[in-house]
Image (tube, rainbow, N blue to C red):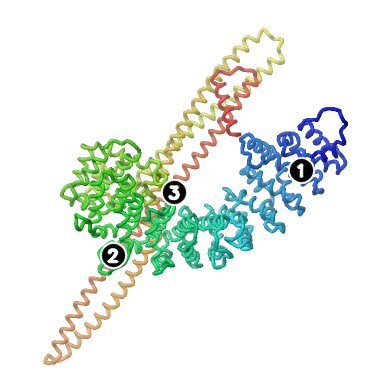
Amino acid sequence: MASILKSVFGPSTAGAESKPSGAETVQKLSNRVSSSVNLDDRRDALRAIKGMSRQYRREVGNICLPLLFQAIRNDISDGECVGYAVESILNVLSSDEGEERTDELLLGVDYAEQILKDPENLVLLLRLLEEFDFQVRHPTVRLLTSLLCLKMVDIQEAVLSSPMGISKIMDLLSAKQEVIRNDAILLLSYLTRSNSQIQKIVAFESAFERLMLIISDEGYSDGSIIVEDCITVMQNLLRGNSSNQAFYREANQVQSLVPFFDFKLSSSLKWSNQKTSNVLAMLLLVRCLVAPSNSQQNVSACQKVMHQCRLLEFLCMFMFASGVPTAVLVESINTVAEVVRGNFVNQQFFDTVETPSTPPRSGILTILMCMVNEKQPLPLRLAALYCFQSYLYKNEVGQSKVINTLLPSSTETTVSAGQVLCAGIFGNDSLSIWMTAMSLAAALNSSQKPQLLRVQLSMQGKGQVTLLQQCSDVLVNMPDLKPLSRVGLLVLLCTWLTDCTAAVTSFLDNPVNIPYLTGMIEHHYNNDTDQIIGGLCATLIGICLVYNDGSSSGYSPETLREIITRRINQDSFTQSFTQLSSTEFFIQASKQPQIQAGSVNQIFFDYPFTVLFRQVSNAIQRALDPSIETNGGAEGVPTSSQNHLISQSQLSASFEEHSSVVQQYKDLLQEQDRQIIELRNKCQELERGRNGNDTQSLLSNSAPGTNGELNKELVSLREASLSHSRLQESLRQELGQKNAELERMREKCEALQLQLSQQSSSEDVSRLRQEVEQLRSDNEALLTEKTYLDTQLNQQLTLSAIAPPISSNEGETQEKLRQLSEKNLGLENERKNLLTRLAEYEARLTDYGSLEVKIKELVSKNESLEKEQEDLLVLLADNDSKLRKYREMLKNNNIPLSASDDDDDDDDDDDSDDEDI
């Protein structure tokens, strides 16, 4: 550094002036760069500024930042000058490594904002990317990355507005220097975050092919951190971007992932930290394609391709391989879960997977055993539960297989899924009890719930008892049962009894169950856990009320309703189960199907129960309301179609009410605009009055009158401004309330959509249509056979009429005629039954179609209301800015403001400061 400064300023005289400060030195160097006509002098000065830019970061940024960009423009043909200037800017933006002070970070943000004030600065940097000089290109890439870290959104918009800006960055992936290529990948990882437009452009610039080529050259999972960076960019391009997901699949890029998981091609069997990170990143990439939050069309198509290209097979082999780190094993199980979730073909394939052990064991059974093994880490057990639930999701065949392993069977098996589940649900580990309860709940559907009532257990001291009775006995007779176990059993019973009158009757026939549930509801809630258990007990009683057909001798619907209203109190009962949805555990579980928990204390619910609860809670509230109950289905039990229609009518009414509120907002805004126009006119009059007073100051006699008028105008102006501010504040509060109301309505709409999709999904409709086609073909076949039999009968009748009455075969002929007539009659009856079933299926298809149309209309209304609210927020922001402008005009006119106006101004300033920060 000393030699550089000496070359710039020349040798110093001994004993002369004291050593200059850093700011003075930077100022002199800045003057040299701006004033020197000698290129070497400017180059030396830039070199010196670069050397001081780390130690004197603030001084260089305050003095030289605009000058550095000007130096780049002036000496753009000189690579050294440009390189020194770019590196100086980079040092000014970036704090020292390990330095995390807030003021230093904010300083970099301030300098980034200064750079972005001139749009030509970013255009200049993008132009430098075309330079082949390493000294220029490499620091420019790093500078753009640093700018993205500090002001990501602004840089993304600037790059989008720059012609060929993204193409210039993509060309860096083909750079011969690996350093530039690697830094370009890092730059893309920041550039592609949370911006769908950039993501689409980058994807169409062959990003997937280029990045996979780099991954292949680096050695797939055995590669360096560059592999992880490439996968990160691909994740950004695919996560939540449906068009890129479709483009990725249609470009046959899913098949390119297979070699990554084929460890026969791996050069090393050891699991280094980087290899673990690479595999975890690639598993997350696979999950980006099949995440449940994606569109169902993309998920189904990707699941199909993953099975066809054997990616699912390699993932299953990888999941059961030995020596895999725990973190990778957990993520691989979660990935397989989402690849098979809701796809029957993939679920059938997963059903055939076996572990590479001696003897081989079913993969599903291995997953269950891992789930109930309390020695396994919590993330691994949660992943096993998610995988098992995904295998059973919309898989009636798999659900039937699991339930059949619980039923009595003549065949002997060593270990079955039913045995593992029974051992887990009545074991000593609370987490195993909860997980097996969630697993059994996932295996239940409308046809399997009555079958589960046949399950018999051999309990010591009790003999043979049903599974339902044993679950209720454990709840009632074990007061020291841990809360998690109690919650698991209650969730299982709620799922089991919903829409199953036989299970409700069996549960109510046990005389101790209802008193236990009412006692738990009346119990004093000491903490959140007691509140959750009480809410689940109230939900279970409500389900018994809704799906009670009156066949229970002890508790009819009227008896349960009387217990709720007289013993518990209807308001307390309703509050108990409705508060469940507002608990932190419920909200966390309702976000996604996969359970996310860092400890056992964070677990109470799973995603399927949150969906079920939203459905039954509305039915319970309607069952408690006599006016709605009398208009309901038979005996007060609401059917699923009635639930849909009631929910839709309520939702439509809510939308109409919300529309009227929005219209009121529009009227208020129009009134506000009118007041703003009046204020503007008054300000203009005051401005003209002030100018007139300045030019005619000699007319002092008329001043008192003029000032009086101005004072009156000012008072009225202040009053109007104050009322206007109050109106805006009340409007904001009302708008916030309506936003919360709209959010609740949106949740209702989503729950209704989910309920409809579960009952009338595309797979169900296609299955119904297949059954209809099969019935039609069977009907045609029966008609053909009937025609043939009619012909045979007519022939036999003709022969019998022609043949002589003394024929020896007359008895055989009559018997054959009688059999043909009976068979013909049976075929005719079967044909009528088929026609009846055909009409029923067609009616169901018509109902599903009408429900889908209504849901689409409600969603469209919801979107339009959201757009109107966004417009209202924009208008409110415009009104705020106009009011602030008028206050500034009053201040500029030297007209004093009231204390409330000053406070408003201070608040506005504070708000603006907060926004800047």
Image coordinates for residue 208, horizontal then vertical, percent: 60, 59
Q: Height in image: 48 above or below 352?
A: above
SS under mark 2? helix
How far is the residue under mark 2 from the one under mark 3?
Answer: 45 Å
Label 1: state its secondary structure: helix
Which kind of residue does numbered mark 1 sit on? Ala
Instruction: Examine the rendered structure and indicate whether residue 161 appears above or below residue 710.
Output: below
Which residue in the protein does label 2 denote? 837
Residue 596, numbered label: 3
Amino acid type indicated by mark 2: Arg
Q: Residue 587 in the image: state x and y as whole percent.
A: 41, 44
Q: Mark 1 against mark 2, which lies toward the viewer?
A: 1
Q: Is residue 615 left or right of residue 210?
A: left
Task: Say which of 55 and 119 sits in front.
Answer: 55
Regarding mark 3 in the picture, which secondary structure is present there? loop
- The mark found on residue 85 in the picture is 1
The residue drawn where x is 39% and y is 58% is: 370
Q: Position of residue 529 (x, y in %)?
A: 34, 41
Tell me whether circle 2 and circle 3 mark residues in contact (CB < 8 Å). Answer: no
Measured in 3D between alpha carbons, the distance from the residue under mark 1 to the one under mark 3, in whole angstroms, is 48 Å
User: Is residue 222 or residue 46 the one in the foreground?
Assistant: 222
Q: Is residue 564 visible?
A: yes
Residue 445 makes an appearance in the image? no
Q: Quadrant of residue 906?
A: top right
> Three-letter amino acid code at disc 3?
Gln
Task: Say above or below: 416 vs 516.
Answer: below
Indicate which label's residue lies in the foreground, 2 or 3.
3
Residue 20 in the figure: left or right of residue 717:
right
Q: Earlier in the sequence, mark 1 or mark 2?
A: 1
Q: Nearer the viewer, residue 496 or 405?
A: 405
